[in-house]
Image (cartoon, helix red, strand yellow):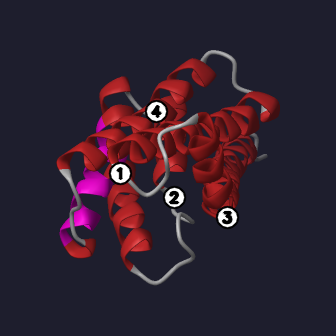
Amino acid sequence: MLAYFLIFLGAALRVIPHPANFAPIAAIGLFGGVYLSRTQAIVLPLVAMLVSDFFIGFDSLQTRLVVYGSILLSSLIGIWVRKHKNLFTVAGGSVLGSTLFFLITNCVIFYSTAMYPHTLGGQLVSYTNALPFFGNTLAGDLVYTALFFGIYEAVAVWQAKYAYAHNHQS
């Protein structure tokens, strides 16, 4: 049930108006990698992307493959974080996922268009011009990661306290 909810939430939050790149998809991948099966962790963000892309629209196959592949990295990071979970690895995993997404997608888009000269200087201008999108990506990933992990952990603590209190009533 949680998996279906995350797909719906991810797709819905990409479709409704929001700042560019401020979306929960990478956070869903990271969260899924920590708390769900490996298959679910890999499939959830990709399905959420696919469903929302039906409403938003598709661009080139090359771009979609790069974007989906970059999103998949957050799931793989989450699978690693599962065995090392603490505040720092979760936050670091979110930042790493955002950074990899920024570097990979902007590199591929740079080489696949004539928008910038294909030189080191052109690449640097491309990354510089994309920094506002990186800020939104990083902020969105951190906010949604904090929400997903925070709510999940708070519910787990509440359930444990409730179970303890229920089992130790006089």
Q: Tell me which amino acid carries mark 2.
A: Pro
> Disc number at residue 132?
3
How far apart are labels 4 and 3 at the CA level? 24 Å
> Disc number at residue 113?
1
Q: Provide residue 48's location: percent of width, then percent of height.
A: 31, 56
How far apart are labels 2 and 3 at the CA level? 17 Å
Task: Say if mark 4 contacts mark 3, CB within 8 Å.
Answer: no
The correct choice, above or below, for 165 with respect to 72 in the image is below
Q: Which residue is mark 2?
A: 24
Mark 3 or mark 1: which comes first in sequence? 1
Q: Is residue 161 magenta?
A: no
Part of the protein shown in magenta: 43-54
Label 1: state its secondary structure: loop
Q: Residue at x 57, y 18 (%)?
A: 80
Q: Residue at x 72, y 45 (%)?
A: 157
Of discs 2 and 3, which sits in the foreground? Answer: 3
Q: Provide residue 13's location: percent of width, then percent of height.
A: 44, 71
Question: In the image, 2: left or right of 58?
Answer: right
Of discs 2 and 1, which sits in the foreground? Answer: 1
Question: In the image, 55: left or right of 149?
Answer: left
**Badge 4: how crowded within 10 Å, few (<14), some, or many (20+)?**
many
Mark 4 or mark 3: which comes first in sequence? 4
Mark 1 or mark 4: which comes first in sequence? 4
Q: Tell me which amino acid carries mark 3.
A: Pro
Q: Which residue is mark 4?
A: 75
How far apart are labels 2 and 1 at the CA level? 27 Å
